[in-house]
Amino acid sequence: MGLGEQKQGFCVGLVVVVVCFAVFAAFWVPFVRNDDDDDDDNTTYTKPVDTYVSRMSASKVMGHLQDLQNIASDNNDTRAVATSGYKASVDYIVSQLKSGNANCDPKTQSFEIADWQSLETPVFAQVDPAIDFSSDLYMQILTYSGSGDITASLGVLPADNMGCTQGAWSGVDVKNKIALVIRGECDFHEKATAAFGAGALGVLIYNDGTSEERMGPFAGTLGELQPGPVFSLSHSVGNQISNSPNQFLMQADTQTTVSETWNVICEWKDGEEENTIVVGSHLDSVPAGPGINDNGSGSSMNLELAIQLANSPVEVKNRVIFAWWGAEEIGLKGSDYFVQNAKANGDLSDIQLNLNFDMIGSPNARLEIYQGTAVLDPLIKPGCVAIQSIFEQYFDIADIEFTTVDKLNGAKSDYAPFTTNGIPAGGLSTGNADIKDADERTIFGGYANAAYDPCYHMDCDNVDNIDQDAVQANSQAAAYTLGTLASSPQLSSLLNFDSTKRDQIRKDTTKRVFASI
Ligand SMILES: [Zn+2]
């Protein structure tokens, strides 16, 4: 995995930092020093982190997981958004932060979410001669489609026009018609907004046929409620109707219920605000189960990181914000709200990095570090590489095997609102419903040809669905990394930022990640 090469690169970027981490690592011996040892030049910086690491343990994290399990058991076996189990989880985190003397005044950050349902089977058909395309072989309704009962002819963009802006429709007669546009380049929300803005009554997005997986109709989210029906079509149906002068019928009956939910925020009282580190994990489960690995595990570890940071000698030079995100499972809503809110308040440029912990105790675990070296965005890549390197240092020092995973280019968890807004990120995970292979079994143990988490998003994701060794390793790796970053005297050098360029790009960007592409 190019480990040596990455570390070399990391050190080269650190010439201005007092201690290069490769050297530092050679002097750092985990778990053997204590607070009362005499100082010397190499240990004054590392000892508090050492103490922080040693205070993290699987048994402490398991205590919180049992409490979250009890909360789920008392609330219909779920902790999903818009349930009493989620509200009880929020109250639990707040009370534990207080009783554990975390150095913050824990707050809930309220935001609205829209619960969307399609009430009737959607209809798409050619009117005369009648051809019914209302089969999931040909079409699907997209999440947050509006309602409507429309009979109209098509307004069609040529296949090389991706329809990402309203201007893309200039010269195309789409007013009071059904817009037909190909998939790709921008998210479904942008395509629908552009077409409705140009006067369309309904929108059809057909697959682009660029690979075998992109032939059929597709599921996806529009991020927020649209003013009319929006369906995906297969590549062949899109092509077939693109020159049709006929009238088409679109029928959709959807319902959107708006409700309130919360993030829990613990802003450390120490540390420079302009060097803020956000440590996040989503607190909501899916409706199907108690969500103990996904993501009680990351949330409980995050809680213990906050409590033990308060009880450790780590000097927090860079402010830490611990966050427990709501509504991750319905589209990263809580972390997106936090980032957009910080942007609106002018606080986004204070945030230097995000650490994300989502599923850190999978029962058939492999130990995954988010791969900064694979990041495509050159703005955030150096920071992501640096964060990856610190996690790797811990696993190397502790002599624990790990692997790296290319997640940061996607939007699979709550790092995405940060990375898409110019903030580097890193994190740990242990695998979901994907399958462990024989080589990984040799390295990590467990079962080959079985899922890392066979209870992923199921009712059996309970307190027995946890590998405590993985929790132990990840809890200490997280403390090492957070302790190192929080106490770093030169965080921006460590992350290799060009802050002027970054702030400019952040100012210009209005990116959201809530819709699919
Ligand atoms: Zn998750």
Image (cartoon, grey):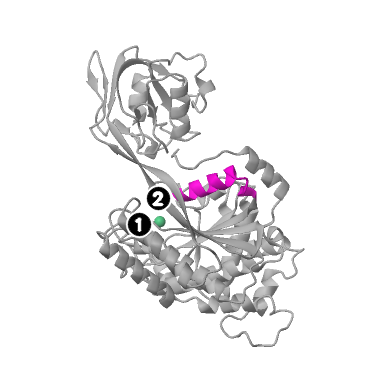
Q: Which mark is residue 308?
A: none
Q: Are marks 2 and 1 in contact (CB under 8 Å)?
A: yes
Q: Which residue is mark 1?
A: 86
The residue lying toward the viewer, choosing from 190 and 210, is 190
Q: Secondary structure at mark 2?
A: strand
Q: Residue at the location (26% across, 60% down)?
A: 77
The image position of residue 121, as x and y in percent, is 23, 32
Question: Is 300 positioned to the left or the right of 317 in the image?
Answer: left
Residue 379, how many percent across, how many down?
Answer: 64, 47
Residue visible at 44% across and 39% down? 515
* Three-letter amino acid code at the position of disc 2: Thr
Residue range in magenta is: 334-349
Which residue is disc 2 drawn over? 261
Q: Is residue 151 above or below residue 388?
A: above
- Sequence order check, earlier mark of 2 and 1: 1
Query: Split into 4 quadrants, where in the image is the C terminus?
Result: top left
- How busy is the neighbourhood of tag 1: few (under 14 within 10 Å), some, or many (20 plus)? many
State the residue in front, 112 or 78: 112
